[in-house]
Amino acid sequence: MQKAIIFDMDGVICHTNPFHSQAFKSFFAKRNMYPTESEFADHMYGKSNSYIMSHFFGREIVGEELLQLEDEKESLFREIYAKQVNPIGGFMEFLNQLKSNKLLTGVATSAPLANLELIAGKLSLLDKMESVLASEHVSKHKPDPEVYLKSAENLGVLPENCIVFEDSFSGVSAALNAGMKVVGVLSSHTKEELPPCDLYIENYLDLNLKEVTSLF
């Protein structure tokens, strides 16, 4: 019976949130808007760009306007982050362990494909992943389970045979809604801020593969 491990990207593979924060700060500053760090914590981390933009602009941002604004902000992020790409401690070693144990692996992110390509390119992840999905590949965003159900389908694995690594409320909810086990990565949130997960980690440095696979 095939088993799979699926990773979200921001806050799970790389600690990108501080850089998204920088990008949003300069994006909003151009418009004379100056959200505080606590507003970002409540309304940015783990949220879709549509939610973030709509919240801070105080009106619904959709369609063509959303695409243009999103493109501007994500280009800023890629500019800032391109020279900083760095995986969370122990991630690459853990991924190599998964591959040497013949586990299928995938990435399922709400970020645009260009961000995924930047990070996956710098870390040489693409040849290690049997499924790679970004925001363009789904019509419904987390907490909807679509990206995780689609990942399971790509991997040819039943949802109950998938373990997801997630760091945000909407991401953990999406994985639970897909009927999958979840490891909460506490890079941006505390345990109390996430729905109940099957296991929690700060990083991958002391992560025992047996502890993870025992969740199957």
Image (spheres, helix red, strand yellow):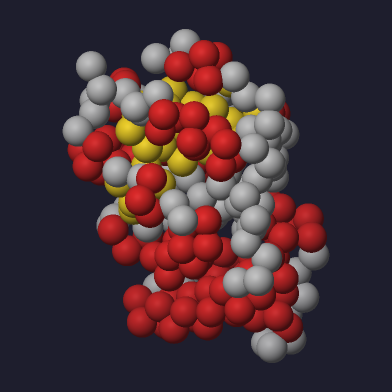
Tally of numbered tags: 0
Rendered position, 107 above or below 159: below
Horizontal side, residue 196 vs residue 132: left or right? right
Residue 59 is at least partly visible in this image? no
Depth check, front residue: 42 or 90: 90
Residue at 55 percent of width and 33 percent of height: 94
| Residue 77 image-quadrant placement | bottom right
* Quadrant of the frame with the C terminus: top left
* Quadrant of the frame with the N terminus: top left
Residue at 65 percent of width and 80 percent of height: 27
Depth check, front residue: 202 or 20: 202
Residue at 65 percent of width and 45 percent of height: 88
Rendered position, 205 above or below 87: above
Residue at 36 percent of width and 28 percent of height: 103
Q: Residue furthest front?
A: 100
Q: Position of residue 127 (x, y in %)?
A: 35, 51
Depth check, front residue: 2 or 143: 2
Q: Position of residue 134 (x, y in %)?
A: 37, 57
Horizontal side, residue 170 vs residue 33: left or right? left
Q: Position of residue 64 (x, y in %)?
A: 36, 82
Residue 53 is at least partly visible in this image? yes
Q: Position of residue 209 (x, y in %)?
A: 53, 20
